[in-house]
Image: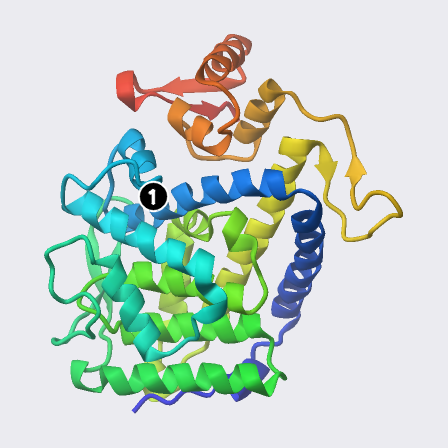
Amino acid sequence: MRQFDYIHSAEALLTPRTTNLLTAIHEAKGRQSVQAAIRPDVLESMTAIARIQSTSASNRIEGISTSDKRLNALVMEKTTPRNRDEEEIAGYRDALSTIHESHDYIPLTPNVILQLHRDMFRHTPLTFGGHFKDTDNVIIERDSEGNRTVRFAPPNALITPELVQQACTAYSDAIRDRRTDPLLVTAMFIFDFTCIHPFNDGNGRMSRLLTLLLLYRAGYNVGKYISIEHLIELSKETYYEALAASTAGWNDNMNDYTPFVNYLLGIILSACKEFDERLTELTGVVASAEVAPKNTAARSPKPTKEQRITALFERTLSPLSKAEIHTQLPDVSISTIERTLKSLLDAGSIVKIGAGRSTRYVKRR
């Protein structure tokens, strides 16, 4: 049967590439700690944006969606679900809120995992929420055209509870040991959780919720301000490739964690970089971990709202709708967004795609 030992498995992961990723994330953590202390108002706005993006992206990866207007209302609890998709979105919102607000009191145990899964399905009539799978399942991979292929056959349903318990114990042992970087332990556990595939449904969303929880518990709060789920959605093909590369030999304890670990560390580092960029856009403050006598960051002129919209296109490859721009820049009015979009279109800086409600804008490259 599959065995878990994150202390010894981590030793093989300390290649120059992995070490460089860890070092960069550690440095970014210091910068974020400074900014959290001096800019709580700005970070509160970033937190609200991240929660909407996380709820939307994690569900959309699984083909679950609703309109932007309905999504915002659901996340802010200003409406109730109208259909199955919205029921699952509301459940993810609840589980996500629990992690954001109570992570210090949520240890990684099988019971906690079951409770989060139960919460994720609490608004649906489905009865399997909060229970491990009762039948064997397979991990399906979807390509860009929506075609489905079987990537991996997880362990038998009968041994799933025992495997989850062993993986949780291995995680706790490695964290208590203190010799292994918590980021490596987190990435290895999340990968093994995905391979165990312990639920009838909701495994992908649970893996992303647990990623956020374990980052919080390791002292890395970037997922509070920047949506990890959104970054995974944007790199979905690479995500599936990393999973596939690390899966070979898993059942025989012969797999290589490196591809998935480096992928997840890259996502975390991307979130750290986006944190710095967004903070600069919102405040004109260049993030710094060095604390000066009166200031803890270097100031540059605060960007205008128009400049912030332009900067959003600079760092976003995917087309954006007006609603998506407003979600990321909630203090910018729709009229300002429309005026800026017209100016950018007239200048040839962006391109309009689609029409009506499907209208999106993307930078001309």
Residue ranking furthest to the top: 346
Q: Amino acid at mark 1?
A: Ser
Q: Is residue 164 visible?
A: yes
Q: Position of residue 62 (x, y in %)?
A: 26, 51
SS at circle 1: helix
Which quadrant of the figure contains the N terminus? Answer: bottom left
Q: Position of residue 58 (x, y in %)?
A: 34, 51
Q: Nearer the viewer, residue 42 or 189?
A: 42
What residue is at 71 percent from the left and 59 percent from the top? 27
**Splitting the image into 4 quarters, where does residue 287 fall?**
top right
Q: Is residue 177 left or right of residue 118?
A: right
Measured along the vertical axis of the image, is residue 73 above or below residue 22?
above
Q: Is residue 259 visible?
A: no
**Splitting the image into 4 quarters, where does residue 141 fall?**
bottom left
What residue is at 32 percent from the left and 63 percent from the top? 206
What residue is at 35 percent from the left and 76 percent from the top? 248
**Splitting the image into 4 quarters, where does residue 70 fall?**
top left
Q: What residue would you read off at disc 1?
A: 56
Tell me the crowding category of disc 1: few under 14, some 14 to 19, or many 20 or more residues within 10 angstroms, Cα based.
many
